[in-house]
Image (cartoon, grey):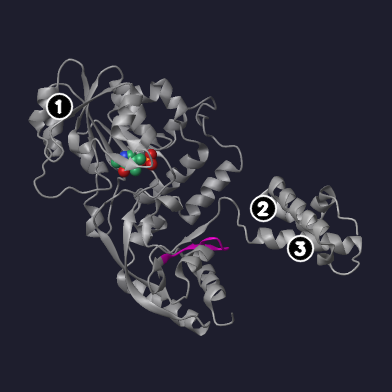
Amino acid sequence: MRPPAVGRLLDRPEVAALVVEHGRQAVAEQLRLAVESLRSNPDQAGPDPSPEAVEVWVAGQVAGHMSRAPRRLHRVINGTGVVIHTNLGRAPLGEGIARHAAEVSAGYSNLELDRASGRRGDRQDLISDLLAHLSGAEAAMVVNNAAAAVLLGLTAIGRGREVIVSRGEAIEIGGGFRIPDILRLSGARLVEVGTTNRTRVEDYAQATHAATAAYLRVHQSNFRMDGFVARPVLRELTSAAHAIGIPVLEDVGSGLIPRGPDAVRAEDRLRGSISDGVDLLFCSGDKLVGASQAGLIMGGKQLVGRLRRHPLARALRPDKLQLAALEGTLLCYESPERLEEIPVWWMLGRSSDELRHQSERWAVNLGAAGCRVEVVPMSGAVGGGTTPGPELPSFGILLRVPKVAAARRKLISGDPAVLALEWEAGLAIDARCVLPADEAPLLGALAAAFGGSR
Ligand SMILES: *Cc1c(COP(=O)(O)O)cnc(C)c1O
């Protein structure tokens, strides 16, 4: 038997299909391994096989292996109950919104074309009015993410000067985002005032002098301080700052809450901050706003104009996919009845009764497939460094499986991939974040993995 050449194997139709999905390098590597294995153990392809039969055997080996390997970046079914899950790409896009973004980017677009004149336009003009209107600000712009927004704001306004931050807000968000580091990077000097637990307006005032460029407020996204704590009411801080001509910048992190459970409604900091006098507001696009990764900047015309003209803005600008997804999402906020088209809002709006009924349907369905399953009360979270405290009371299913850790790994590496929670008694799946399109594939995957036919 002559082992087949990898080049020939790559031309076979069933192998070409694998190349489309996984790339030529990865498939060629698997073909080489399969051919090598055949060389060292020629009987694998059967007794005295024809050249065609050998090729079929090798292609079959590789197809079997690769079909268990999903694409590098692929969809995951979120069984964790954490709505904005950083490991799972944060906010999922609405289906119609994602379709619009795909259509725009699959062709040419008017990304930088002024429709009226047919000449060069500015991508920032595409949706800045939507964003400004939504937050009540005079002007707005978009950069690649909130970290970039803060960096741009501090650089344009604070470079070579001082920015005052409360000691309790010189924080780390996670993923390497530390306020002191961003300040250093921007070229602004950090001046910490107050104490870890208490800061007053006078603390800012006393530290202010000719070199002071701005005050920076930062949302304490992922932790909460209780007890003997105080920080200035925002309006008092902005009044004091404006009286001496100092702008107030605020990093709210997650932003925008038009409705939802009371626990998260308290987070409505976009409109609230602008009406409280914040001069420049920074917020993430893919947390509670529920859109694409983006850094939203809202504020006064003059300051936003300064940021738009800064050379760094060019390095941090968003692309057409981000802007198209953001446009689609922001448009939903304009009509309250369209809010549920934003998956984050659909998920946050689901009642625990609704989740219990859905879990009961799943349990019946999976029970019939031979799974050992029961409905359990669960507790999810908003996530994404949005609100540290509130839990989202929820329901889900508990699958009794023997080796829980191994079962969880199997689900996450499967197709469709499912991220479940490891409980002592088995694998738990919170119903809240299972999107409608994920429901049938989820039940199929669970029945196949843990059903009675196995
Ligand atoms: C999440 C967060 C950021 C970073 O946002 P990205 O969009 O991930 O860059 C910055 N500041 C706060 C307060 C946050 O919560």
Q: Which residue is mark 1?
A: 241
Question: Residue lying farthest top?
Answer: 210
Q: Rate crowding at label 1 as few (under 14), some (14 to 19) or many (20 or more) other CA atoms within 10 Å.
A: many
* Residue 368 among magenta residues: no
| Residue type of the residue flagged with mark 2 | Glu
* Residue 416 among magenta residues: yes
- The quarter in which the N terminus is drawn is bottom right
- The quarter in which the C terminus is drawn is bottom right
Tag 2 secondary structure = helix
Q: Which residue is mark 3?
A: 60
- Disc 1 + disc 3, Cβ < 8 Å: no
> Which residue lies at the image location 27% right of the left edge and 61% below the top edge?
391
Q: Which residues are magenta?
A: 412-421
| Side of 389 relative to 52 (left or right) | left
As drawn, 366 above or below 382: below
What is the CA distance from the residue labelled 2 to the residue labelled 3? 16 Å
* Earlier residue among tags 1 and 3: 3
Q: Which residue is mark 2?
A: 21
Q: Rate crowding at label 2 as few (under 14), some (14 to 19) or many (20 or more) other CA atoms within 10 Å.
A: some
Tag 3 secondary structure = helix
| Residue type of the residue flagged with mark 3 | Gly
Name the residue nearer the viewer: 42 or 358. 42
Please indicate, yes or no, whether residue 138 appears anywhere in the rendered image: no
What is the CA distance from the residue labelled 2 to the residue labelled 1? 56 Å
